[in-house]
Image (tube, grey):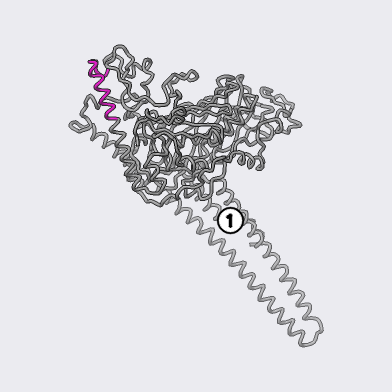
């Protein structure tokens, strides 16, 4: 035992190996839950404590041996002295007890050494057994996935067989939306986990007083002045906790909102019995029980992007467009912070469903969402803030289930315009992946890149969401990026994680590093000390029993008067689920879905009738619906068929489904056809005139 360091001891090695194997199993599938910072801190803390205790034990061993020998020498010297007979007998007895104590201490130390050796030996056996079990589990998952794919292929083959119900083609059955069912080729598309690339740049913190270095390797392409990085004169927040708390106090709502919802019931359900038939299909087309949901709709989840709206309020005050870009970038990342624990899916909105969030008096903005398409599901969103900005987006969700994981790809651009400066920012969302669908604990990862472009000043920000990798030494959920101007000159470095915080560092120098073995040349940025732009609010108490909702999410489904009859707050199945009445919610959900299917079938029948009356058939004009997209601004993404009613060679006019509060128009920035807010909703709310709203609930 003496002289053995903490890392040489078998207990530390066995503990470290078993702990690492549990937290970071050697599985390259990418479906193991990443260890959080708290897990790593706990592991390092335990190792540090164990190491300290072992060092203490070794020190005690040395002290016992040293002091024991000294004690016996002293007692021996006392025995040699001429003392009365009674004193000599007592000293002899004490000497014998000291000898017994030393023998016992040595026996204890030897037992500890034997225990450590035994633990080290058995630790290797346990690791081999655990590795074998993990390999068996992986083989079982792969086998189940292959069986599910074969089952799905057999079902498609059966439906396509002669005489089957699925092969009878009628005029009604041939009518499809331009964004209808995915083809078999699309269903077989594989989605692989993104591979982690080395960072394209390296950040080095520079001394503000001596940031100018001499050297031929400095390009001088990006230079700044540290005096510009002044906390008092800038809208940037400092990284201390006090400013964060003050920010939270400023955001306290004036109206008292609810702070809790009923606890989530403990319902058991066989996941695989439902998911096995979903392989390769759009998950939005599969009827799912509310057991997999959370009591919010997709429209409400989309509104949650505004949780950190104060970042945009601060961005309005920025005089520099690149500085403003930093806040916009932090805002784009903040929308993912609510997803880290939210593994349940939101309710898929019904066609025509709306959701409003009027916080004009409290936070200065009002938001409106509408479900403008059902297959594929698409939602339009518009936000106006009296503090100087407007945000709008149309998001279409594409999803693929591949057995072990589910990929969710949001399609569509997000627009943000500042009223005073006219700066217009556009960006798109990254891919979200839900891992361990079949076996293990569900966890979510975000991966991909976001390019934010200011179409007025041409400033850009490239953000990279690094996918989780067992082999990476970086922190999980890492986000990095660079803000540059129209000339490509880098001004700021963005860094942080999408679930905790984002920091911004001002660049004072840039240089080109050496070329790597892969032929890539990294840029080295010298920066000033980073400043925290965004930090996640702590979750409310008991959040784990309330679907991990944030303070804002708890208020989104709170009953409110004077809203439209199509508002998500009035959706009965969602309300029943929130109350914990899941069985009734499932029945109500089936009723609403069947009601929506009936409306869709009636709309398809009207479309077929309109075409037949024109005598032209489905492709009567020789172009078909898809060929007339330039003349049919209402023909993209609606529920059911949307004939080219503006084409002079088409049949009888038929408009198809038209959104209530949004209209189709070409976006001048991206050239895409989007749903933009046409007005009228808030005026209708003031008058309480909802006569145009359909009966969807």
In this rendering, position of residue 627 left or right of residue 608: right
| Residue drawn at point x = 27 percent, y = 23 percent | 607
- At which x and y percent is residue 338? 51, 40
In this rendering, position of residue 575 left or right of residue 234: left
Prevailing SS of the magenta stretch: helix
| Residue drawn at point x = 66 percent, y = 31 percent | 235
In this rendering, position of residue 445 left or right of residue 420: left
> In the picture, residue 109 is in which quadrant?
bottom right
- At which x and y percent is residue 608? 25, 22
View extreme (right): residue: 82
In this rendered view, identify the residue nearer to me: 426 or 512.
426
> In the picture, residue 107 is in which quadrant?
bottom right
- At which x and y percent is residue 68? 71, 71
Q: Which residues are magenta?
A: 600-619
**In the displayed structure, would residue 276 be above or below residue 680?**
below
- At which x and y percent is residue 99? 68, 76
View extreme (left): residue: 163
For label 1, the crowd category at 10 Å Cα-Cα, with few meaning under 14, some 14 to 19 and many 20 or more, is: many
In the rendered image, the quadrant that contains the C terminus is top left
**In the displayed structure, would residue 262 be above or below residue 229?**
below
Q: Is residue 101 magenta?
A: no
In the rendered image, which residue does mark 1 sit on? 12
Q: Secondary structure at mark 1?
A: helix
């Amino acid at each position: 035992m003496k002289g053995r360091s903490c890392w040489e001891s078998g207990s530390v090695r066995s503990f470290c190996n078993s702990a690492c194997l549990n937290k970071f199993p050697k599985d390259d599938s990418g479906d193991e839950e990443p260890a959080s910072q708290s897990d790593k801190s706990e592991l390092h803390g335990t190792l540090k404590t164990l190491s300290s205790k072992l060092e203490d034990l070794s020190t005690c061993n040395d002290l016992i041996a040293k002091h024991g020998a000294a004690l016996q020498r002293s007692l021996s010297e006392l025995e040699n002295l001429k003392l009365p007979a009674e004193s000599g007998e007592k000293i002899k007895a004490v000497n014998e007890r000291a000898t017994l104590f030393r023998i016992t201490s040595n026996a204890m130390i030897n037992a500890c050494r034997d225990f450590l050796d035994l633990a080290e030996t058995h630790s290797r056996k346990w690791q081999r057994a655990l590795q074998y079990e993990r390999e068996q589990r992986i083989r079982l998952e792969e086998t189940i996935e292959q069986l599910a794919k074969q089952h799905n292929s057999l079902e498609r083959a059966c439906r396509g067989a002669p005489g089957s119900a699925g092969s009878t083609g009628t005029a009604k059955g041939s009518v499809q939306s331009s964004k209808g069912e995915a083809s078999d080729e699309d269903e077989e598309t594989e989605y692989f986990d993104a591979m982690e690339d080395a960072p394209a740049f390296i950040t080095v913190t520079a001394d503000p007083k001596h940031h100018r270095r001499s050297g031929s390797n400095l390009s001088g392409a990006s230079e700044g002045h540290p005096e510009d990085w002044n906390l008092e004169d800038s809208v940037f927040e400092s990284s201390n906790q006090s400013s964060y708390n003050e920010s939270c106090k400023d955001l306290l709502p004036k109206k008292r909102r609810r702070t809790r919802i009923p606890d989530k019931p403990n319902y058991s359900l066989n996941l695989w019995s439902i998911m096995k038939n979903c392989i390769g299909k759009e998950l939005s087309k599969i009827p799912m029980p509310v057991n997999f949901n959370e009591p919010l709709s997709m429209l409400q989840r989309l509104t949650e992007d505004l949780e950190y709206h104060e970042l945009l309020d601060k961005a309005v005050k920025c005089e520099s467009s690149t500085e403003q870009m930093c806040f916009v970038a932090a805002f784009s990342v903040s929308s993912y912070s609510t997803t880290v624990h939210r593994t349940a899916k939101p309710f898929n909105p019904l066609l025509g469903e709306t959701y409003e969030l009027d916080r004009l008096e409290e936070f200065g903005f009002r938001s409106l969402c509408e479900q403008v398409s059902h297959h594929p599901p698409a939602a339009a969103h518009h936000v106006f803030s009296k503090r100087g900005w407007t945000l709008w987006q149309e998001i279409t969700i594409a999803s693929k289930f591949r057995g072990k994981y589910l990929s969710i790809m949001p399609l569509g651009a997000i627009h943000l315009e500042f009223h005073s400066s006219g700066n217009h920012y556009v960006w798109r969302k990254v891919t979200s992946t839900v891992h361990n669908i079949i076996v293990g604990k569900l966890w979510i990862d975000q991966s991909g890149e976001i390019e934010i472009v200011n179409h007025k000043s041409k400033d850009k920000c490239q953000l990279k969401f690094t996918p989780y990798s067992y082999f990476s030494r970086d922190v999980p959920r890492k986000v990095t990026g660079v803000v540059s101007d129209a000339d490509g000159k880098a001004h700021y470095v963005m860094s942080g994680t999408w679930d905790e915080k984002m920091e911004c560092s001002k660049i004072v120098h840039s240089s080109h590093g050496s070329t790597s073995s892969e032929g890539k040349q990294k840029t080295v940025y010298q920066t000033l000390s980073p400043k925290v732009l965004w930090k996640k609010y702590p979750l409310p108490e008991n959040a784990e029993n309330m679907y991990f909702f944030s303070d804002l999410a708890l208020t989104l489904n709170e009953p409110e008067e004077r809203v439209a009859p199509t508002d998500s707050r009035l959706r009965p199945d969602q309300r029943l689920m929130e109350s914990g009445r899941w069985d009734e919610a499932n029945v109500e959900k089936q009723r609403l879905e069947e009601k929506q299917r009936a409306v869709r079938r009636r709309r398809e029948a009207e479309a077929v009738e309109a075409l037949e009356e024109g005598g032209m058939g489905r492709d009567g004009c020789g172009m078909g619906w898809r060929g007339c997209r330039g003349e049919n601004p209402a023909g993209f993404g609606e529920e059911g068929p949307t004939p080219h009613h503006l084409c002079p060679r088409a049949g009888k006019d038929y408009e198809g489904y038209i959104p209530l509060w949004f209209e189709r128009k070409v976006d001048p920035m991206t050239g895409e056809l989007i749903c933009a807010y046409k007005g009228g909703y808030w005026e209708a709310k003031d008058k309480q005139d909802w006569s145009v709203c359909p009966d969807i609930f």
